[in-house]
Image (cartoon, rainbow, N blue to C red):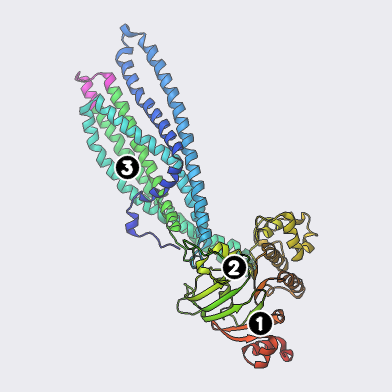
């Protein structure tokens, strides 16, 4: 995950919000319309004190009795314009905020899908979901309601300040001297609010991350009677989040209190000075009323600006967290000018002196100068003890990582020089831990090739023996399987994965311990489906159960990141090496 913000970054005030500018610019027509509605509403608001002044100075004079009807008629018209413009401003700004945040969420999710193994080795899914949901919701609140209020009050404050100067320069001079001090207090307090808001969002993300892990493993927790321990850990995370949120709220409350007191205390002082001027005959009551109304508008604008400043500061913290995520660049990326793969595909795989260490374990070599050539249509079995590097071969072939040295080639092309999407389209994977989504069986199989027709999908399901259990389900192919396929057995999940691989029509098939967790009956069915899926494909099989690899064209034996033996089952047993020892453990005296 990205590193937390440094104290220097915390002092950057609202600068992270500039990251939203490209999204705003995309909808500049709507933004300009919102600004136009804001201008009309502000002008209507600023006209009202002038009408009030003339009504007070002339409307109550017996000689101008007819003016009062006109002034009230004008006020009604102004209020109508204000209401329409305010409604339009609210609609435009709120929908703009919703649109920007929807685009931002889509951008973040798309970016997450492009990040590589190095990132996901340390990232926590709950933390990422928190940034995708909670942080973007905070931004939506600021870009929508808070931005609308802030813009309105900025314009009102500036307009009211100008009209105050026009109405009474000397009273304005007194008030405007105090404003910089008020603004300085608000800005200084806002930095504290933003810092505490960022801390609150970080602790909430940690709580969300733990909750996601615990809910995903709830049956394991229950089986181990670890509910109380999990509950205590989550309660502690929630309490830390609450304390951080309370500190942020306390800072915002203090900011609101100080801001409102300074602003309205200044207005009261000006009102006192104006009242003395009216008594001295140097100012008319209407002029004082007009000035006070403008002062109240300016004070209200500045006061509400102080209130929303905290929300905008929170949004700045959320934007900074999202910007950190979007700034993460994957090590694995398509080159600027990718080399095309040959057509038609052959299904040829080559490892040329490949060495690799995982980023989280830089001192331990996962592969050391591994060389391997797999011919089109060949079946290769890869065996060896745990940690020998078998799965790492698949990780590199799928280009979840790039090797530290050496090359991996598909159909004669170094995959570093190819587009990862084009290269992965030539590979079908059946993993040991199958990813099943909380949707229908049909849609889970369709993941193998989203553009496939229903007929193609059901044919793949038939070849993978999925149709055998689908026929017994009430909704057949449309049956929902629950989160992670919780309603399916291990064998059923594996057959869905095989159906995906068949539907994919890829020339290279990777089988990673596809039957290791199955009972004997399920293994027989899955193995039958696997045999069908291998037809006409280059196949690499990782297996601990040696009985599943006896029919392979070649068996590679790996140990400590190296290929230490190679040959057929009979030849390797006769050699008496590592494979022979593994075979003896599994087959006993029948190993030969």
First to last magenta residue range: 273-287
- Image coordinates of residue 261 in percent, x first then y, are 31, 38
For mark 1, what is the residue? 554
Magenta stretch, overall SS = helix
State the CA–CA distance, disc 1 to disc 3.
Answer: 78 Å
In front of the other: 84 or 186: 84
Kindly identify which numbered label has been placed on residue 258.
Answer: 3
For mark 2, what is the residue? 226
- Of pointers 1 and 2, the one earlier in the residue sequence: 2
- Image coordinates of residue 313 in percent, x first then y, are 38, 48
- Which residue shows up at 21% across the image and 32% down it? 173
> Callout 2: 10 Å neighbours few (<14), some, many (20+)?
some
Kindly identify which numbered label has been placed on residue 48.
Answer: none
Q: Quadrant of the N terminus?
A: bottom left
- Which residue shows up at 45% across the image and 61% down it? 329
Residue 208 visible in the picture:
no
State the CA–CA distance, disc 1 to disc 2.
Answer: 46 Å
- Image coordinates of residue 486 in percent, x first then y, are 68, 62
- Of pointers 2 and 3, the one earlier in the residue sequence: 2
> Callout 3: 10 Å neighbours few (<14), some, many (20+)?
some
In front of the other: 85 or 411: 411
């Amino acid at each position: 995950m990205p590193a937390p913000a440094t104290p220097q970054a915390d002092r950057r005030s609202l600068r992270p919000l500039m990251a939203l500018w490209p999204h705003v610019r995309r909808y500049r027509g709507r933004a300009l319309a919102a600004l136009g509605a804001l201008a009309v509403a502000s002008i209507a608001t600023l006209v009202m004190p002038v009408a009030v002044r003339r009504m007070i100075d002339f409307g109550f004079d017996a000689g101008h009795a007819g003016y009062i009807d006109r002034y009230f008629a004008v006020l009604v018209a102004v209020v109508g314009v204000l209401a329409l413009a305010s409604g339009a401003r609210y609609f435009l700004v709120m929908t703009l905020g919703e649109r920007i945040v929807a685009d931002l969420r889509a951008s973040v999710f798309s970016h997450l899908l492009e990040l590589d193994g190095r990132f996901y080795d340390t990232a926590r899914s709950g933390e990422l979901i928190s940034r995708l949901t909670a942080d973007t919701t905070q931004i939506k609140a600021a870009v929508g309601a808070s931005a609308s209020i802030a813009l309105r009050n900025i314009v009102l404050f500036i307009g009211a300040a100008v009209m105050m100067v026009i109405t009474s320069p000397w009273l304005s001079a007194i008030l405007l001297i105090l404003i910089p001090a008020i603004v300085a207090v608000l800005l200084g307090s806002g930095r504290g609010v933003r810092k505490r808001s960022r801390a609150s969002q970080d602790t909430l993300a940690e709580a969300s991350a733990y909750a996601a892990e615990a809910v995903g493993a709830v049956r394991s927790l229950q089986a181990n009677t670890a509910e109380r321990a999990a509950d205590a850990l989550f309660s502690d995370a929630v309490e830390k989040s609450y304390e951080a949120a309370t500190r942020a709220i306390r800072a915002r409350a203090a900011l609101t209190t100080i801001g409102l007191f300074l602003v309205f205390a200044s207005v009261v002082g000006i009102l006192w000075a104006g009242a003395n001027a009216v008594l001295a005959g140097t100012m008319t009551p209407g002029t004082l009323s007009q000035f006070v109304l403008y002062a109240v508008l300016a004070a209200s604008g500045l006061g509400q600006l102080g209130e929303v400043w905290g929300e905008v500061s929170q949004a700045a913290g959320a934007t900074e967290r999202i910007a950190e995520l979007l700034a993460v660049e994957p090590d694995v990326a398509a080159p600027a000018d990718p080399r095309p793969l040959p057509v038609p595909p052959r299904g040829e795989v080559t490892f040329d002196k490949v060495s690799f260490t995982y980023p989280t374990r830089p001192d331990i070599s996962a592969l050391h100068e591994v060389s391997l050539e797999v011919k089109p249509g060949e079946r290769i079995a890869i065996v060896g003890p745990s940690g020998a590097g078998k799965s790492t071969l698949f990780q590199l072939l799928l280009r979840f990582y790039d090797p530290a040295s050496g090359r991996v080639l598909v159909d004669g092309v170094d995959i570093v020089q190819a587009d990862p999407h084009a290269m992965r389209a030539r590979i079908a994977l059946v993993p040991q831990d199958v990813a099943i989504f909380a949707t229908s069986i049909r849609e889970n199989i369709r993941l193998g090739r989203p553009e496939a027709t229903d007929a193609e999908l059901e044919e793949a399901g038939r070849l993978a023996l999925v149709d055998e259990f689908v026929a017994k389900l009430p909704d057949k192919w449309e049956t929902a399987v629950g989160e992670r396929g919780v309603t399916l057995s291990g064998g059923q999940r594996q057959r869905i994965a095989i159906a995906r691989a068949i539907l994919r029509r890829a020339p290279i098939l990777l089988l990673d311990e596809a039957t290791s967790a199955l009972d004997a009956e399920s293994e027989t069915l899955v193995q039958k489906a696997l045999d069908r899926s291998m037809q006409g494909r280059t196949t690499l099989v990782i297996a601990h159960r040696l009985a599943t690899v006896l029919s392979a064209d070649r068996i590679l034996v790996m140990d400590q990141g190296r290929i230490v033996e190679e040959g057929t089952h009979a030849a390797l047993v006769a050699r008496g090496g590592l494979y022979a020892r593994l075979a003896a453990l599994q087959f006993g005296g029948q190993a030969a």
